[in-house]
Every structure is written in structure tokens, then in C-alpha cells.
């Protein structure tokens, strides 16, 4: 890293990359210096729109750029692994969109690579950095609802089936589980720890990806989480954490909330309002920027072991629904001609 700014490169200028860009304005000491697309034209257009100095027509060129410290990988899930491995080997730090990979084996490989190369890496689970979620965790740690016993979380959207959209494409790791379910499982893992059992019921799209899924996770001492996600039902996105002396509501939508309500047994409910900065992505960008500047290799708030625990649940649930995704080993594109 040169100078005082952490230099970011964007990989895959699609929908989420577009949404996240504006939040860099709220991140001290971060600069987006490059973008890479599979198409030089798309890279140029994105660079022009956002005032980015370098536009690459392949991911390999960005990975080879010595003036970039950290990559934000914003491609579909099955492409994260090959890009992440190549980038880690080139010494780049990584912010990897959720779901971290399309498979558990892929997540394990990527974690091994980033650890072997001593680069920072984090799943872009922005929920954990939302100020309202931070407040909820403080309350839980202070014993505000006693011992945490269970959680109930839902997240649904209404989308027409469209085989051209990555959300419905089998080869792009589509379906509710990896797009929405990852938030549910990560939330449950955050408040209850690592599950010991996974049950699931669900339905499939014509393409074979999951359209909707309900999960029951078991934890030590009989604790449980009940989770529902759907691509065809407007579920509010409500999270509830139940304890031995009360409960906490994380008001919709729980994956980027503004308010939580503490219900202590026998007391009036207490609401805590905590708005995020920008669109809510700034917090995770700050975490990565500060971590990279400080030479850390993991986030204490979103550690890689938590990502692996979540990915294990997603993998098992998908398997129970008969879905077996594969990673895209060709995601970097063809090697440059000699
Ligand atoms: N944190 C959040 O709130 C949030 C929200 C939505 C999505 N996400 C995550 O972000 C990732 C991308 O989602 P998105 O909705 O932004 O997807 P998207 O709009 O389809 O964009 C993904 C981009 O990846 C690139 N790409 C590389 N290989 C590809 C392939 N084989 N097929 C299609 N595109 C490919 C494409 O850019 P080029 O071809 O130009 O390189 C494309 O524009 C997913 O992992 C998703 O779960 C996170």
C-alpha cells in the first residue's frame, strides 16, 4: 500500500457494484482507482460514470495492477472463487459479495488461499455493520433479554421467473437460498452460534434453483432458528431474537434496519433508532479500508470462520433440496496471449 489512501478496484460492474459506489464518498482514506469488466466497453462506461481512472476489459488485468490494494468482487457467486484465489495470490485484499462462494468446498478453498497468502478477506455481509444491528448485539451481550434461546427471521421478494436473470440461473448459483437465505442463516449464526442440525423444505423454479425455502436450524441445548425466504412472496424482512427474559425485534428490513425494539419481560418496549450512513454499504467499506490500512487479515465482526459456518448450512440445505452448484473455474477468462 502506498501513501495514506487504500486503493480499491471493482470487479464485475453490475447492479450491486453500481449501488455500492456512492457509499465510497463516506469512507475516509479510500479511493476507487480501477474497475474491471469482462467487456472493455462496460468497464469504460462504469469508469466514466464514477470518475474512476483505470478501466480494464478483463479481470486478470486488474489483478495484475500493482497500484490496487483491495478488490471488491461483485460478480455472481460461482465466479467469486477463481477471481478471489488469483487475487489473493497476487497479494490483493478482498471484499467478496455474499454468498461468499457457490459451494462449501469453494469457500474452504478461498479461505485457505487468503490465509496462506496473508491477505485481508471478508464476506460483504453488510448487515453485521448496520448501526441498528450493532446496537442489538450490544444489548444481547449485556444480557438485556437474558439467555438467547431462539430466532425467527424472514425475507421475501416478488420476482417473475426470468431465465436471463442470474437470480434464476442454475449455472450462476441462482435461487432464494444464496441470495436471501444467506442473510437469514448469517443472522441466526450471529446470535446463536454455529448450528448442529439443518432441516429444510422448499420449492424449485423451472430452472431447478430454489424458489422458496423454510429452514429449521438446531443449536446446542435445544436452541433453534426458524427461517423463511422466498422469491415469490413479499415477506417483510423481520428478525426476532427470543431470550429467557424478553425479545428483540429487528424491524424490516432486518438485513439493513434502521430500528430495533427491546421487549423486556414486564417492561414497556424500548425502541432504538440507528440510521446507517449512505445506503448502508459504507460501514463494511470502512471496516475493510481500516483493516487493510492496519495490516489486519480478518474482520472481528465478520470473521471468515463465521462465513464458513454459514456456507456449510447453505450447502447442506441446498443439498437437501437436491441442488448442487458448481464453481466457475473459467471466471477469469482466457489467459492473455504471450
Ligand atoms: N449486498 C447486497 O445488498 C447485494 C445485493 C445484490 C447482490 N449482491 C451480491 O452481489 C453479487 C452480484 O449480484 P448483482 O445482482 O450485482 O449481479 P449482476 O447485476 O448480474 O452483476 C454481476 C456482474 O458480474 C459480472 N459477471 C462475471 N461473470 C459473469 C457471468 N458468468 N454471468 C453474469 N455476470 C458475470 C458481470 O459484469 P461484467 O461482465 O461487466 O464483468 C455482471 O454485471 C452476487 O453475489 C449477489 O449475491 C449483494
Image (cartoon, helix red, strand yellow):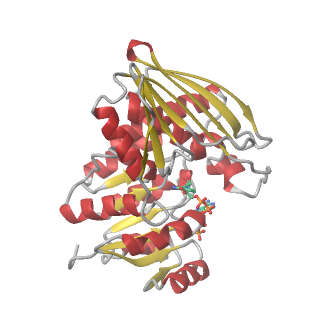
Query: Is 94 rendered above or below residue 153?
Result: below
Image quadrant holding the N terminus, namely bottom left
Q: Is residue 92 left or right of residue 310?
A: left
Residue 221: horizontal and vertical position, in percent?
Answer: 38, 13
Query: Is 338 rendered above or below residue 224?
Result: below
Quadrant of residue 144 within the rendered picture: top left
Q: Residue at x 59, y 44 (%)?
A: 180
Residue 149: horizontal and vertical position, in percent?
Answer: 42, 20
As rendered, which of 194 and 208 lies closer to the eye? Answer: 194
Q: Residue at x 40, y 38 (%)?
A: 308
Residue 89 visible somewhere in the drawing: no
Q: Is residue 116 left or right of residue 161?
A: left
As rendered, which of 34 and 116 lies closer to the eye? Answer: 34
Query: Is 216 rendered above or below residue 65?
Result: above
Residue 333: horizontal and vertical position, in percent?
Answer: 54, 66
Quadrant of residue 220 within the rendered picture: top left
Amino acid at each position: 500500500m502506498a501513501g495514506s489512501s487504500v486503493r480499491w478496484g471493482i470487479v464485475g460492474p453490475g447492479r450491486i457494484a453500481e449501488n455500492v459506489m456512492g457509499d465510497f464518498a463516506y469512507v475516509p482514506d479510500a479511493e476507487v482507482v480501477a474497475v474491471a469488466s469482462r467487456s472493455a466497453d462496460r468497464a469504460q462506461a462504469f469508469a466514466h460514470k464514477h470518475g474512476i481512472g483505470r478501466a480494464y476489459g478483463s479481470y486478470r488485468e486488474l489483478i495484475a495492477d500493482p497500484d490496487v490494494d483491495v478488490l471488491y468482487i461483485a460478480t455472481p457467486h460461482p465466479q467469486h472463487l477463481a477471481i478471489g484465489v488469483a487475487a489473493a495470490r497476487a497479494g490483493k485484499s478482498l471484499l467478496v459479495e455474499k454468498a461468499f462462494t457457490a459451494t462449501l468446498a469453494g469457500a474452504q478453498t478461498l479461505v485457505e488461499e487468503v490465509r496462506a497468502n496473508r491477505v485481508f478477506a471478508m464476506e460483504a455481509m453488510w448487515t453485521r455493520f448496520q448501526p441498528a444491528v450493532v446496537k442489538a448485539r450490544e444489548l444481547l451481550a449485556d444480557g438485556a433479554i437474558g439467555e438467547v434461546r431462539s430466532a425467527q427471521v424472514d425475507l421475501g421478494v416478488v420476482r417473475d421467473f426470468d431465465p436471463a436473470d442470474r437470480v434464476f440461473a442454475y449455472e450462476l448459483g441462482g435461487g432464494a437460498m444464496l441470495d436471501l437465505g444467506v442473510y437469514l442463516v448469517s443472522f441466526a449464526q450471529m446470535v446463536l452460534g454455529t448450528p448442529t442440525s439443518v432441516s429444510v423444505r422448499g420449492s424449485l423454479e423451472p430452472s431447478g434453483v430454489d424458489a422458496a425455502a423454510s429452514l429449521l436450524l438446531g443449536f446446542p441445548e435445544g436452541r433453534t432458528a426458524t427461517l423463511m425466504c422466498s422469491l415469490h412472496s413479499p415477506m417483510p424482512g423481520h428478525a426476532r431474537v427470543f431470550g429467557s427474559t424478553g425479545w428483540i425485534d429487528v424491524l424490516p428490513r432486518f438485513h439493513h434496519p434502521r430500528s430495533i425494539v427491546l421487549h423486556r419481560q414486564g417492561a414497556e418496549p424500548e425502541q432504538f433508532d440507528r440510521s446507517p450512513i449512505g445506503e448502508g454499504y459504507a460501514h463494511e467499506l470502512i471496516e475493510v479500508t481500516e483493516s487493510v490500512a492496519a495490516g489486519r487479515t480478518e474482520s472481528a465482526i465478520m470473521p471468515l470462520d463465521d462465513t464458513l459456518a454459514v456456507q456449510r448450512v447453505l450447502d447442506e440445505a441446498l443439498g437437501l433440496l437436491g441442488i448442487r452448484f458448481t464453481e466457475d473455474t473459467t471466471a477469469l477468462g482466457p489467459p492473455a496471449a504471450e
